């Protein structure tokens, strides 16, 4: 199944799943505790490998994005310590080309949407 064949409603459902089995309903549940309906459970079990891989990729992006502000602060700290006027522009002037590439990567991670199919799941 190609990227375009991934069914967004299944990815969205799986991104919102708490995969702990609920013996009271014989289903999984949503992150907010609501049990899956029988239809949602059937839909979840019908996920393809590509859809499960997309869910994993989206969760990985979310985790990376959650860590990015701290990583950016840690990355910039040595430059800011050298400056009397602590601005991003001044810090960039101290950086090597490789450092600027890393800064671009970190800033891009902050700006990148968290979810392709499930923007409000987390």
Image: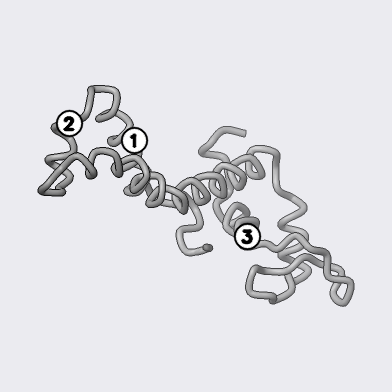
Estimate the spatial distance between the alpha carbons at disc 2 and disc 1, rounded to whole Å. Answer: 17 Å
Which disc, if any, is residue 13?
A: 3
Q: Position of residue 67 (x, y in %)?
A: 46, 50
Residue 104 position, x and y percent, is 28, 35
When asked about the image quadrant of residue 26, the answer is bottom right
Neighbours of disc 2 within 10 Å: few (<14), some (14-19), many (20+): some
Residue 43: x, y in percent? 72, 57
Q: Could you say where residue 66 lies in the image, as x and y percent from the top left?
A: 46, 53
Tag 1 residue: 105
Tell me if 82 is positioned left or right of 69 in this view.
left
Residue appearing at x 57%, y 49% in the figure:
59
Could you tell which of marks 2 and 1 lies nearer the N-terminus? Answer: 2
Tell me the quarter of the image containing the N terminus.
top right
Label 3 vs 2, first from the N-terminus: 3
Answer whether labels 3 and 2 touch (C-beta < 8 Å). Answer: no
Q: Dot 1 surroundings within 10 Å: few (below 14), some, or many (20 or more)?
A: some
Q: Nearer the viewer, residue 5 or 34?
A: 34
Alpha carbon distance from label 3 to label 2:
46 Å
Q: Which quadrant of the figure has residue 2?
A: top right
Q: Nearer the viewer, residue 86 or 59?
A: 86
Decide which of 14, 64 is in the foreground and name it.
64
Please name the residue that numbered disc 2 is placed on: 94
């Amino acid at each position: 199944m190609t990227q375009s064949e991934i069914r967004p409603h299944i990815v969205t459902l799986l991104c919102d799943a708490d995969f702990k089995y609920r013996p009271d309903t014989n289903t999984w549940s949503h992150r907010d505790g609501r049990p899956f309906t029988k239809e949602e459970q059937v839909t979840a079990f019908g996920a393809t490998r590509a859809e499960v891989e997309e869910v994993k990729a989206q969760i990985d992006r979310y985790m990376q994005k959650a860590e990015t502000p701290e990583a950016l602060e840690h990355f910039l700290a040595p430059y800011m310590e050298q400056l009397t006027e602590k601005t991003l522009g001044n810090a960039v002037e101290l950086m090597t080309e490789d450092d600027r590439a890393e800064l671009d990567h970190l800033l891009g991670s902050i700006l990148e949407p968290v979810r392709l199919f499930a923007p409000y799941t987390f």
